Amino acid sequence: MRFLKTLGYLLALPLILVAIWWASTLGETNFFVPTPALLAEAFAETWFGERIFSDVLPSIGRLVVGVASAIIIGIVAGLLIGSVKWLRDLTEPVLEFFRAIPPPVLVPVLMLLMGITDGMKVAVIISGCVWPVLLNTIEGVRAIDGVLSDSAHTYGIHGWARIKYLVLPSAGPQIMAGIRQCLSIGLILMVISEMFASSSGLGFTIVQFQRSFAIPEMWSGIVVLGLIGVALSFIFQWTERRVLRWYHGLREVENAV
Amino acid sequence: MTQEAVTTNSAAPIPRARKQPAKKLPSKQLLGIAGIIGFLLLWELIPRVGIVEPRFLPPASEVIAALITDFGLTAFWVAVGETMLAWAIGLVMSIVLAVVLGFIIGSSMFLRKFTNSTVEFLRPIPSVALIPLAVLLFGVKIESTLMLVVYASFWQVFIQVLYGVADVDNVAMQTAKSYGLGAMARVRHVVFPTALPYLMTGIRLAASVALILAITAELVIGSPGLGREIALAQSGGAISGMYALVLATGLIGVVINLVMRFIERKTLSWHSSIRSEVIV
Amino acid sequence: MQSETTPGTTPAPAGKTLPGNEAMLSVRNLKKVYKTDGGDIEAVRNLTFDLKAGELACLVGPSGSGKTTLLKCISGLMAPTEGEVLLNGTPVSGPPKKMAVVFQEYGRSLFPWMRVRENVELPLKNQGVPRAERDKLVDDALEAVGLSHVPQSYPWQLSGGMQQRVAIARAVAYQPEVLLMDEPFAAVDAQTRADLEDLIRTVWRKLGVTVLFVTHDIDESVYLGERVIILSSSPTVIQEDLTIDLPDERDQLNTRSLPRFTELRHHVYEQIQLAKQGHRPAAAVQTDSSAGSGAA
């Protein structure tokens, strides 16, 4: 019974929306909006074929490489800068400036510096995604509790052990918040770098469909991007809940008081 | 078991002010300035020494000179104006939409559950996926920019408002009811003040997202504004000019961040704790 | 007999000192001055005392008397401005290996991302103690503090008193020679506090560890210690170094109702009041050489 209710809540609105869509495209044919059946057909035709290998997977590959590198660079540099006060003071204004630059303007810049290559697209993703991770890690490291730090110190926990047992977990919630932003910026940059400067990839393909007025195919491309976004968001939430289980528990206890 | 307790009762810890010798404030700012100067020097040296060719990365002095020239040009300020106009209109539209929907959906348990799956599905869709649609519908006009800006900023505000409304204290709500406050009065005196800090956080986040999307739309679609100027400068080989415009977007970003943080602090100065962002 | 000035040093009175190699922990002419933007603050002026191995001494003083500062200097978390701290004759320059500290803020001294058992185990793991030995030490420590039943809980799922027990278990498992406690029970309720006091006595007697227990609670210091070192108000010197001649077996009901307990408490209380009023110990100690008698 409870399961049915949950399922009802989960599906009711999406079904209603699809029904409205279906009903409104029933009578006349709207040039801009295909019928649900037409879209589904276009989706299957367009994406279940060699496009997966020629466009979708390479795009996703660049995204994964870019985001993963940005996360690693951001965390490592953040640990270093966050632990050294003078370094933090020295770099803060410059980093704040870099964070404030809208990441998409990096596309023409890097295009100029590196040419139109896979490396450039990955570099665009890295250089746009690294800031939220970096700045959040710095803040997380800076905010480590003094008593906790003293405790670790008195028990002789130094160096790598200190990073592993104290610094990383303590900055964990902040780092995860940065990674969340990093993921959505990464997806945006993946699409833009391909729209702006490419001859393959998801972004390029979708723009091509739009330019040749292949409307159902264009919509199906939008759906693919949406699905990637949703999938990333689910993977993130799943991971976050496991990594920060302690943090959510702690928050619950604190809020209950 | 207790006798009359003759303890010096207060567990007052020694005042926090007496901690490790604190670095003086000016030295922090001096270091920050040193950092900026160091960065500019590095940027000046890299093309001069030849690590990167100057035609791809002009030295900092050239770019700054180009930026200063830009400051004297009407065309530059027109582009800035166009970008900021799209930013402002888009931001206001998304805030209004998100506040209205957020308060309505947030105050009803049923609506929250009913819309949850749809929200969770729509929110992660990258707004740039809408670029082809925007081009198809509006071409290279400001409406294209607005569509992307509104879609992206809406979620930032909407989600925060939902959290804010959900955070309303039940006791406060019941107290208000028992004193006969009507629905509108309850929203005004109980729900709104509780949700305000969240709303402000949402607006601050939306403000920077809106700038990103405004520039993106101009860059990719070619609607008028700084983004388009950057694309034009790049394809036209005006490299120093392009870097100058990139610097300008960064400066606008910094100004927006500072102004938003300032507004947030001012609006919430009455609030006991300026809330940190909800990690969701 | 309670206090003797160390010859040849400053006129400030000192705590009891021991000849050369008998001391486990020695504090010598310790001085700490904080440099702040608003000028220097002298938190600790001059402290000298020794702890012999296996002793349980309490350090008591009015609020803001630099107790925490002193403890931080002893534990090597902070460098003194002048003077030195010796552990087994070796100067302390960083946190020594054979020393454990229990902080007042139990909620902030345990790792919230580790379960109880992992928290207790971590220092041992970090030292490379072999698995089997580690398990035994952790089991014994948890057993000793009465927490064998919750090893898989997170600290924040436990009450304040239980969390402080975890911190004590961690210190015990670490097998320190010296255990420093910084107002460990200031933030727990009275009933729990009594239990924890008895726990400390039990653990101390079982392990034979040297304990320096900092507190602002006069009753607690007299009940727990074999010796109570009374600090003056800031800038801190030693007001008096007092031997607690209560029987070794102590329990909350009987010990606390002994006339001698009342006398000692009364005496410490008076000294603290004097300290608060700014009486410097040189005078106080000389006119009041014997505890108890002068207190009535």
Image (cartoon, coloured by chain):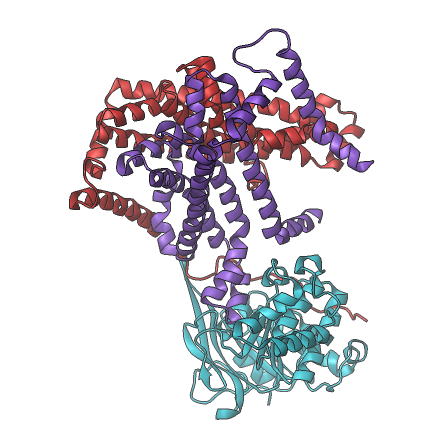
Which chain wears purple? A
User: Which of the 4 image quadrants contains residue B197?
Assistant: top right
A95 in relation to A159, above or below: above
Q: In the image shown, does C227 or A114 lie closer to the viewer?
A: A114
Q: In the image shown, does C256 or B30 lie closer to the viewer?
A: B30
B221 in relation to C157, above or below: above
User: Which of the 4 image quadrants contains residue C231?
Assistant: bottom right
Which residue appears farthest toward the right when viewing the image?
A: A1
* Residue A186 visible: no
Quarter occupied by the C terminus of chain C: bottom right
Q: Residue at x 49, y 21 (%)?
A: A218
Q: In the image shown, does A11 or C77 lie closer to the viewer?
A: A11
Residue A41 place in picture, x, y as percent: 58, 22
Q: Residue at x 55, y 10 (%)?
A: A30
Q: In the image shown, does C130 or B17 lie closer to the viewer?
A: C130
Q: Residue at x 24, y 46 (%)?
A: B42
* Residue A131 visible: yes
Residue A5 place in picture, x, y as percent: 78, 33
- Which colour represents chain C? cyan
- Which colour represents chain B? red
Q: Residue at x 74, y 83 (%)?
A: C260
Residue B190 place in picture, x, y as percent: 69, 30
C276 in relation to C7, above or below: above
